[in-house]
Image (cartoon, rainbow, N blue to C red):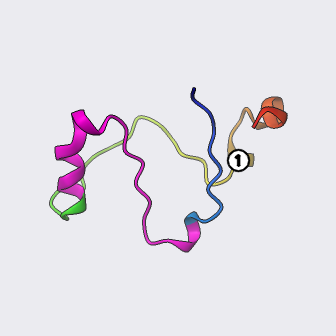
Amino acid sequence: MACAVAMPWVDDVNSAIHAWYGGQENGALAEVLLWRDFSGKLPITFPRCIEDHGATPYFLGDV
C-alpha cells in the first residue's frame, strides 16, 4: 500500500536514502554511496512536510 510518510527528523540528519527496487537499482545506489555518480534525476517531488502536499486537506484524516 502506498501512503505518505512524515519524516520530521529529516532536518536532523546529513542525508536520507529512499531506495526503491534495490534489486534493479543496487548498482546505481552503490555509485551514489561511494561518491562516484551524483547525476541522477527524479521524476517526482518529495514535500518537506505533509502540509506541503497538495492533497493533504482532502485526506489528512486518513494519514
Say left or right for 8 vs 21: right
Q: Residue 49 location, x and y as percent?
A: 67, 53
How would you rate the neighbour count of disc 1 (Cα within 10 Å): few for under 14, some for 14-19, many for 20 or more?
some
Q: Residue 10 location, x and y as percent?
A: 56, 64
| SS at badge 1 | helix
Q: Residue 16 location, x and y as percent?
A: 44, 59
Residue 1, magenta (yes or no): no
Q: Which residue is mark 1?
A: 50
- Looking at the image, which is closer to me, 7 or 36? 7
**Which residue is found at the position 84% from the left and 35% from the top?**
61
Where the N terminus falls, by quadrant?
A: top right
Say left or right for 52 vs 23: right
Residue 20, magenta (yes or no): yes
Quadrant of the image occupied by residue 32: bottom left
The amino acid at mark 1 is Ile
**Which residue is found at the position 33% from the left and 43% from the top?**
41
Number of marks drawn: 1
Q: Which residues are magenta?
A: 11-32
Q: Residue 51 location, x and y as percent?
A: 75, 47
- In the displayed structure, 33 sits above or below 55; it is below
Where the C terminus falls, by quadrant?
A: top right
**Which residue is found at the position 57% from the left and 29% from the top?**
2
- In the displayed structure, 36 sits above or below 39; it is below
